[in-house]
Amino acid sequence: MTQSEPISAIGPGAHRLSTDGTDRPGAARGTVGIKQVAAHAGVSPGTVSNVLNRPERVAEATRIRVEGAIRELGFVRNGSASTLRAGHSSTIGLMVLDLANPFFTDVARGVEDTASERGYAVILSSSGESDERELRNLRVFAEQRVRGVLLTPVGDDGAAAGRLRERNVPVVLLDHPTPRANQCSVAVDDVAGGELATAELLAAGARTIAFVTGPTVLRQCADRRKGALRALRAAGLGRDALREIPVGAMNARAGQEAARRMLEAGAPLPDAIFCANDLLALGVLRVLLQTGIRVPADIALIGYDDIEFSAAAAVPLSSVRQPTYQLGRIATELLLEECDDPVGHAHQQVMFQPELVVRESSRSEGGGGIVRLAL
């Protein structure tokens, strides 16, 4: 191949496509446009456009002839031009807090499967639990003309979702309930989940509980704390029975840091530890075992999310299970319903209930593997 020959990124004989009906000035040699396809097939450029965009309007014999010309010339559709004409693309945006968290991986599977069934692609992004990064990435979504956005906001949903609604971009809040009647949301009752986790530790005999929690701006952490306090009140215990250990992230490394801080503080150890997610709990578990503390004989431990690694931990981890895949599916269905009918769409606020999964980390005898429904 000489230096002047065009190189195709999608296979031999393929050329870049122009769908505006003309070859653009300055385009690479070998570019094929609608006019060339039309001439090759013996039809008008409008007929080629209909085959690409509205094939049901074209007679079968004509459609087959145009499709043959497309294959022979290596015509490749320019998605950017189609997006500009339609005002939106056949993609949706998904913004989560942390792509490294298996919870969001399972949610994303539900989103992608549902979107694919409807002919949509998904652009996935992470805020990294940063307001600034969240807004920057949402601007990119808008610039890409996504059809709609699934958003797990860092803090209050008002600012981020409001900016998208101002651009007439449909938004569904994911893993984040909202009281707004003009906004769809799909979430799990984290207050109930926090209550379930704490009630399990109290039932195992704990009277003092450490709560390892992530950034205070995260609604999930705040709600799980509310649930923990509710369970303590129901047991006749005061707020001082819950010792909070805040960390700056929701990962295993932060959990290890929290456990070391607790051990180095010199205060009496708690009877149990409730972690705001399983990654934190796995980090805590590692440090406890390294220092010779027995789980659950010395300290009971429970996490949240019931990620895949929890059952396979050195001490199988009790946790609060969330229907992650279903969260993604239902949220995507609501979003695409609104995209299809923005005027007639009825906004819904869907709230799932969590489940308690009891394993060895919270009970020294019996109870392992039992799944209890929410209170």
Image (spheres, grey):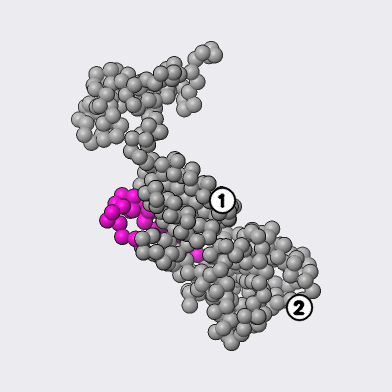
> Residue sitting at 51 percent across and 69 percent down?
190
Q: Amino acid at mark 2?
A: Pro
Q: Is residue 136 visible?
A: yes
Instruction: Please give the residue where the numbered disc 1 appears in the rendered image.
Output: 132
Mark positioned earlier in the residue sequence (2 or 1): 1
Task: Reply above or below: 185 against 7.
Answer: below
> Residue sitting at 41 percent across and 61 percent down?
185
Q: Is residue 347 magenta?
A: yes
> Where is residue 63, by image quadrant?
top left
Q: Which residues are magenta?
A: 322-348
Q: Residue 268: which numbered mark, if any?
A: 2
Q: Is residue 106 visible?
A: no
Q: Residues within 10 Å of mark 1 (few under 14, many from 20)?
A: few
**x then y, percent, for residue 170:** 38, 52
Q: Main secondary structure of the magenta part?
A: helix
Q: Is residue 4 magenta?
A: no
**x then y, percent, for residue 262:** 74, 70
**Residue pushed farthest bottom?**
236
**x then y, percent, for residue 124:** 50, 47
